[in-house]
Image (cartoon, helix red, strand yellow):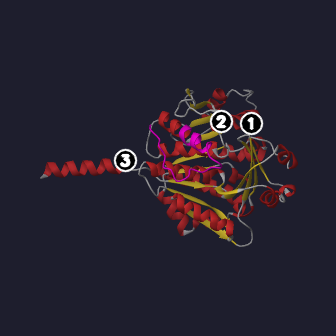
Amino acid sequence: PPVASRALLHRAASLTTAMAKSILGFGNPLLDISATVEQAVLDEWGAQLNNAILAEEKHLPLYKKLTETHTVDYIAGGATLNSIRVAQWMLSGAGEKDKSAFIGCIGVDEFGATLKKQLAEDGVKGVFMEQKETPTGTCAVLVKDAERSLIANLAAAEKYDASHFSSDAAKEAVEASQIFYMAGFPLTHPGGQATVTSICEHAAKEGKTVCMNVSAPFIAEVPPLREMLLAAFEWCDFIFCNESEAAALSKGLGWELGEDSAEIAKKIAALPSKRATPRTAIVTQGSEATVVASAAGECTSYPVKGNPWELTKEMLVDTNGAGDAFVGGFLSQLAMAKDMATCVKAGHYAAGTIIQRAGCTTGTTPPDFKP
C-alpha cells in the first residue's frame, strides 16, 4: 500500500542519514618506539617533557640505543594516524565499522609491515605510498612520570610524493570521505605541503569538512612553517591545539595574549577564512577545561574532571597520544553529527582512556562511551 511504502521510504531515509560520515587522515605515519626512561636519558638527547621535535643528525643513534638499554613497545603512531585509529575505535563501538582511512608514506620493511598490520586490526584502511630507498619513519617516545617527550625521525614519511595522491587508491579514499583531518607536521616537507593544499581544495569544492592541528609549538614558532599553517587554516572548519601550541601561535602572531587560551581560541577562530561555514577553534589544556571558540566570538569551557572521567594521578600511565586521542574522540562524534558538548566529552573520554595505558593504544576492549 502507498502509506506503507511511504513509511518504508522514510525509515530508509532516516537510516541513511544516521550513518556516520567517513574520515580520512593524511600525515606522517611513524612507528612509535616507546620506553619509560630516566632523567639522564632526556638530558643525554636534549629532550624536554611535553614537547615534540624532529630528529637531527645527533639524535639518529637514539633509536637503536633505546632498544638496547630499555624495554620498548612498538606502536603504530604519528599524530594523525593516532587520531584516526582512535576515531575508528570509537565509531566501531557505535556499530560504525570501516569508516576511516589514512594516507601516508612508509618503507618496504619490517616496521612498515607492522604499521599495516596494526591498521588492519584497528579497522583503518591504509592507503600507503611504499618506497624501498628509505626506512619507515620512527618516533622515540621517552616517558617519565607519565609525561612524554617525542623525537621523530620522519625518514620515509617525509618522502611522500604528491603524485601518489592522484593514484586510484588515494582517489577512491578521498571521494569516499566527508571529513578530512591533518596534523601540522606534513607541512615540513614538499609532498606534504602539496597534499594538504589538494585536500583543502577538494573539500572546498565538494563542501566537505576540513580539520587541522597545530601539532607542535615549533610549527607555530618557525615563520615559514607558520605561514603555511595559516594558509591551510583558511580552508579549515575546525582547528585543534593544546595550550602550549596556542601560546606559541599567539606569540608568533604578536597577539600579546600570554597563555590566555580562551582569548587565543577566539582569535584562531576569527582568522581569515575562505569557507562559507564559520570556523571553530578547540584548545585542550591537559586536566584543565577544554576551550571551544567560534568565529562569532563565542567561547565555552568544558571541564575535563568528571566529563566523563574522574582520574587520579596514580591512574596515569602515559600521556603520549592524549591530544591525538582527544581529536579522535571528537571526530568520531562529529562524523555522527553530534552536538559540540558530546564531541568534546567523547574527546575527553578517548584521552582519558589512552592515558591509562602505555602508548596511544586502546587494547581489545570496546569503548564504553555514554554521551
Residue 38 seen by the camera: yes
Q: Nearer the viewer, residue 152 or 274?
A: 152
Question: Residue 196 magenta-drawn?
Answer: no
Of circles 2 and 3, the one toward us is 2
Dot 2: element: helix
Question: Residue drawn 61% across and 42% down?
Answer: 356
Q: Over which residues does the magenta segment extend?
A: 348-371
Q: CA distance from mark 2 to mark 3?
A: 39 Å
Q: Which residue is mark 3?
A: 18
Of circles 3 and 1, the one toward us is 3
Place of residue 333 in the rendered image (x, y in percent of width and height, measured from the top left): 47, 43
Q: Which residue is mark 1?
A: 248
Label located before the other in sequence (3 or 1): 3
Place of residue 72 in the rendered image (x, y in percent of width and height, measured from the top left): 72, 56
Question: Residue drawn 78% across and 55% down?
Answer: 70
Q: Where is the C terminus found, in terms of image quarters? A: top left
Dot 1: element: helix
Q: Amino acid at mark 3?
A: Ala
